[in-house]
Image: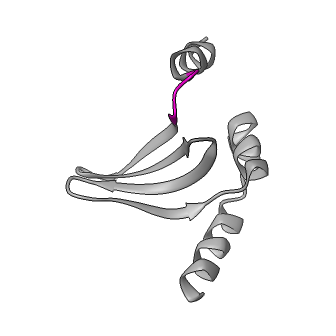
Amino acid sequence: MWGRYLNKLGSGRLIKVYERVPLSQNSFLSVVSIAGKPYIISNTQNDVKILLELSQDDLEVYKNNLEGFDFNLIRRKMKNEKVQ
């Protein structure tokens, strides 16, 4: 029920927030789409940072089945991006 409501609420928007997970009282980790490009971002009281750009395939897996989302793959991608 809520999934349909949230999909309708976010349709037609440039920025969509798929999930927001609190890490502490004032910091969050979010899965978002900005102009159709999916990202994992960190949000704090004073800062927003893009941590990783996801592929469309990663986002589709995430949207369809959270249990099938490979968080280890995301961690490896983040480590590789920091090295480059």
What residue occupies the far bottom of the structure in this picture? 83
Residue 5 spot, x, y in % from top left: 56, 13
Q: Nearer the viewer, residue 49 or 73?
A: 49
Q: Nearer the viewer, residue 35 or 65?
A: 35
From this view, report whether residue 61 is shown above or below residue 52. above
Q: Residue at x 58, y 88 (%)?
A: 83
Residue 74 spot, x, y in % from top left: 65, 65
Q: Residue at x 64, y 81 (%)?
A: 80
Which stretch is magenta?
11-15
Q: Residue at x 57, y 22 (%)?
A: 12
Way the structure is coloured: one colour
Residue 55 appears left or right of 26: right
Residue 72 spot, x, y in % from top left: 68, 67
Please state, as top left, top right, bottom left or bottom right, where the C terminus lies in the image: bottom right
Instruction: Indicate yes or no whether the magenta region holds residue 80.
Output: no
Does the magenta stretch mainly form a helix, a strand or a loop? loop
Please state, as top left, top right, bottom left or bottom right, where the N terminus lies in the image: top right
Residue 10 appears left or right of 57: left
Residue 2 appears left or right of 72: left
State which quadrant residue 44 falls in: bottom left
Q: Nearer the viewer, residue 1 or 57?
A: 57
Q: How many marks?
A: 0
From this view, report whether residue 28 is shown above or below residue 71. above
Q: Residue at x 63, y 14 (%)?
A: 4
